[in-house]
Image: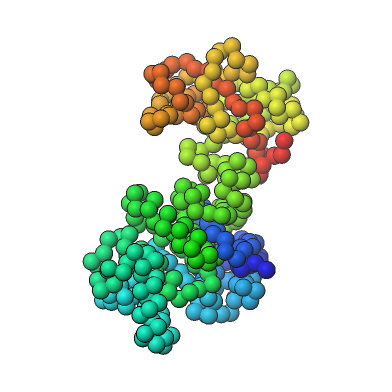
Amino acid sequence: MSQISIKGVKKSYLKTPVIHGVDVEIEAGEFVVILGPSGCGKSTLLRMIAGLEDITAGEIAIGGKVVNQLEPRERGCAMVFQNYALYPHMTVRQNIGYSLKVAKVPRVERDARVMKVAQSVSLETFLDRRPGELSGGQRQRVAMARAMVREPKVFLFDEPFSNLDAKLRVAMRAEVRRLHRDLGVTSVFVTHDQTEAMTLADKLIIMNAGNVEQIGKPTEVYNNPASRFVADFIGSPAMNLFEGEFDADGHFVHGQGGKMNVSQLNGVRQPGKKVVLGVRPESVRRTHAETHGAIAAVVDYVEELGASRLIHADANGSRIVALDTDTAEIKSGTRVHLSLEADALHLFSVENGRRIAH
């Protein structure tokens, strides 16, 4: 039995649909990340699980029990918000223990549980401070401790690190992953940050415009994107995507008449068939002009990354990015030749953007 079961869930505001029928199964103990651009419906879906948004259609079950009509406090979920949602007039101790006080947990037990969770997130020396005396990272840890002290069945995180600086985000990701490993509680985490998603998730749910584009492990989603949207959204820099068609000789023709030798796609090379061909920058390499299938390109600019760099170039009117580890200087306007790794090509339909098997 899944810990969280979402079946045919839809959401509309007045007559405007924003979630178009989502089906997801989340297993007990999984750390699931819902990833997508702003406005795709990921936070709305999370809030429906929590009971903070009504469901227009469909069913949500937690622990085998349908919760559509249950109040948030009855669902066994604890939520960590983007803005911390702490009581500014209360101390850290009072913020963490507030839900226990409301539940009339005896003072001695309440204090013991507050201290235990405070120690787990390294806040035991801050218990008598108020939120205004804490850093952003400390306030976020208070918010997590407040959720943990309830000992919920499910943790829900709504972009909890978006207000933190880059270095602190990395530290907090490690903190959340450690807590999940130690507690083993089913967790659902919403973010628009793909690095956050890839490093945290056991399973990714990619959303786009109220629909689920793909569900899978981070490596599966990265290596085998189910759609053009996923291919373009996952990865930094994004996948190179070329619109074109196959000619009578089986070459892929793109841009202003550029041709690629893609004999490895033999099974789908139908003359005149319009497709989108994709290849990630790390699968594009600089090579020699004599290399079979080499693509001629002119360097536009170079991004230096330290141990490597990204070459942005023009190949017969098509933009292409290659990951390069050569230390030799390369300037704008230089003519280069690029090769594509044979087993790293992806094909997508022009009509619906879905992946074409090959």
Residue 82 at x, y percent in the picture = 39, 62
Residue 325 at x, y percent in the picture = 45, 25
Residue in view at x 60 percent, y 50 percent? 217
Residue in view at x 54 percent, y 59 percent? 31
Among all residues in the image, which is located at the extreme left?
Answer: 133
Residue 10 at x, y percent in the picture = 61, 66
Q: Which of 265/300 is in front? A: 265
Q: Is residue 211 left or right of residue 107?
A: right
Among all residues in the image, which is located at the extreme top?
Answer: 290
Residue in view at x 36 percent, y 85 percent? 108
Residue in view at x 64 percent, y 27 percent? 342
From this view, report whether residue 262 is shown above or below residue 192: above
Colour setup of the view: rainbow
Displayed quadrant of residue 63: bottom right
Residue 87 at x, y percent in the picture = 31, 74
Residue 85 in view in this figure: no
Q: In this view, does 88 lie to the left or right of 270?
A: left
Quadrant where the N terminus sits is: bottom right
Quadrant where the C terminus sits is: top right
From this view, report whether residue 306 is shown above or below residue 162: above
From this view, report whether residue 142 is shown above or below residue 195: below
Displayed quadrant of residue 266: top right
